[in-house]
Image (cartoon, helix red, strand yellow):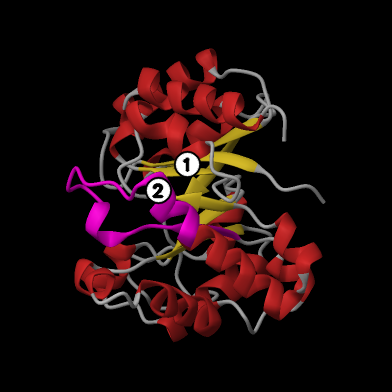
Amino acid sequence: MERKYIVAGNWKMNKTFDEGIQLASAVNSAMPRGVAVAVLGTPYIHLKTVGDLISENSSLFLSAQNCHQEEKGAYTGEISAAMLASVGAQYVIIGHSERRAYFSESNELLAKKVDIAIKHQLQPIFCCGEGLEIRKKGEHIPHVCRQLEASLFHLPAEDMKKVTIAYEPIWAIGTGLTASPEEAEEMHKAIRGLIADNYGENISGQITILYGGSCKPSNADALFAKPNVDGGLIGGASLNAPDFVALIDALNKAKSGA
């Protein structure tokens, strides 16, 4: 299995139903061909319609932004992994920093979400990252390693290969700050090394690691040029079709010889 190069858009709580369909249609029409694929992480209300819209595009995939850790039950307002799979979702974002911060999601809870996502053939996009104080103390690599160990390393190798990891320096999300290409590469290399230590070089080399902190067309070339940066988990720039497509173009350009 070869490593995938992915630009994943996380729309977060944005776009009405009609606005979301317009955005997905624009991306679908302009989707460039190349080594990169794109994932649209839509709100729940868009999943079925967007999934149908992009179903014939082999380079576009559908993602939810979260799922509940239980199969089903009396969890008002929640969505199960089985429900997501039933409307055609192929990915699900798990452990985004906003879920950790605003909904107090722990590493242990996220491990359960990873398990149930994989059970229902959803590929987790697992988010990890550090705040500014941890970065200032120089503890960012041990912090991220602990997140991965607690939430992912119980998986057997065949399931670990199904996980995409998104490193998101929390201090660079929505702040206008961006980790330098060298800072991003340092963390991505450390993540890949940790996986190699636990699963071997072969598995480590197959896992996609995305950068998720204020990645935009103006800095994408430098970030995507780094050997361990396999694409991006994109917030704001995913809400504008030309910007999102420009990021896919940049990833194609950076990885075309890989």
Label for residue 47?
A: 1
- Amino acid type of the residue tagged 2 in the rendering: Tyr
In the rendered structure, which segment of residues is drawn in magenta? 164-186
Q: For the residue carrying disc 1, how many other residues have a C-alpha within 10 Å: few (<14), some (14-19), or many (20+)?
A: many
Instruction: Tell me, yes or no, whether the two marked residues, 1 and 2, touch with CB atoms within 8 Å.
Output: yes
As helix, strand or loop, the secondary structure at mark 1 comes to helix
Q: Is residue 160 above or below residue 231?
A: below
Q: Is residue 135 above or below residue 39?
A: below
User: Residue at image x 57%, y 40%?
Assistant: 6
Q: CA distance from mark 1 to mark 2?
A: 5 Å
Q: Is residue 108 magenta?
A: no
| Quarter occupied by residue 66 | bottom left
What residue would you read off at disc 2? 44
- Amino acid type of the residue tagged 1 in the rendering: Leu
* x, y percent for residue 50: 49, 32
As helix, strand or loop, the secondary structure at mark 2 comes to helix
* Nearer-the-camera pick, 135 or 210: 135
